Amino acid sequence: MSAAVSLLSTYAEKANLKASLDENGYKRALQDTSWADGLRGIAAVFVMFSHLVLAFARWIIIPCYGKDESASLMQRPIFRLVGQGAAWVAVFFILSGFVNSLKPVKLARAGSTEPALANLAVSSFRRSFRLVLPATAATILSWFITQLGGYETAKNSDAYWLYTTSPQPSSSWVSAVDDLLHAIRTTWTYNPDNPYDQPQWALLYLLQGSMFVFTALLATINLTPRWRVLTIISLYFWSWNWGIKLGDPMVGANVFTGIILAELNHSEYPLRLARSSPLFALPLLVVALVLMSFPSQNEDWAPWSDKLLQWYWKIAPANAELSRFWPTIGAQVLTFSIVMSPHLRRALSHRWCLWLGKISFPLYLLHGSFMRTILAWLLFSRQQMTEIEEEGNKHMRYPLPGIPTFMVVMPIFFVILFTATHYWAIKIEPHFGIITKTAEDIMFGKSEGSSTLPLRKD
């Protein structure tokens, strides 16, 4: 009998030790926010995939081949996410709000208001430089390729996204410089347009969203967490009304979601629900991916998308954009499920995901130029131009090659692209950091002799 009691006691001690280790594991997973880098990297890859779909497989964009007709595997929910660029751009905005508010929210919850305000001031300054400098460098690179005729193969191809985003060389180098300055300027103006790098349309709104975050936190930093969250939730719903006046109705809703997630991340709820998170986080993840799959055209063709279309007309705010409403809601549900799940956090913190996160911004900036040059050259170098009819008009273009050519070319292209973005991240990005730090030291008065006017001694 005593032996049995001793055995049960030993088993209970081991069980308690195992539970303690599990609890510690949950705490470590929930304290780690590197998952945001992993998710950002995955989002950047899918944005690139969406442009490949627009170039070579536009049939994936529609939910099926016709009204109530059959659909291929890649047109079905979740699988079609390779063509859902809008959904993954929404993830960028949510993560921007999340990451930019993590530290200020943590400091505010600890009662360190002054350090939180100082962090907001420095972060808002750095954010502008860390977006504008790399984007300008990528624009100059693409501009130079354009003037040398590097995009001519892409412009004469039958790959839709390639020929519609390949600019013409300027008439002279003098006008080319003027065109470059115009492109850099219009990247950061209302209705942004960069003819040398089309994906940069989102950068103004990313910068705008960051300023929403800094301003909202500045106004609510002294509130208690409960009242700050309630205020941000109010801003979330309000932004659906006024966001359209600023050029994009989704920016505010997404970055305010990021702030709410930062508050949730620093709360006790993820830890309290950690053990039961697989019961709700994984189903939420599936729902999120289905919502993110909502098509941008012919929404009423497939039963699943038609059902979401009917719900859109019932619940969507007046200024919402049909093609982006459900993908945006899906991206918000996706990030919520990750914040609440230590398992999803741990999966996204894998070293390969973190590496993708490290190269995410260079990948976003460079993939278009590489697609219009290296990928176009590899795919069409042996093609002969043929007459192709498009919307009643005939054009001489390089026809798309067969599947065997894609199977050979795409792995080579990916190796070249990811190698280039890796070296950009480790060799070029640090220089932008140095420039930003130097400007910060000068403009914040941290360096000697930085004062424009002499200071009074009294």
Image (spheres, rainbow, N blue to C red):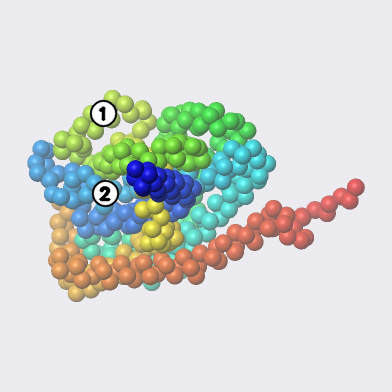
Q: Which mark identifies residue 311?
A: 1
Q: Is residue 249 left or right of residue 118?
A: left
Secondary structure at badge 1 equals helix
Q: Residue furthest bottom?
A: 382
x and y, in percent, of residue 31 in the image: 49, 48
Q: Residues within 10 Å of mark 1 (few under 14, many from 20)?
A: few
Residue at position x 15%, y 50% in the image: 73
* Residue to which mark 2 is pinned: 81
Residue at position x 19%, y 74% in the image: 382
Amino acid beneath label 2: Leu
Residue at position x 74%, y 58% in the image: 450
Q: Residue furthest left?
A: 69
Total tally of numbered discs in the picture: 2
Q: Residues within 10 Å of mark 2 (few under 14, many from 20)?
A: many
Residue at position x 34%, y 57% in the image: 45
Secondary structure at badge 2 equals helix
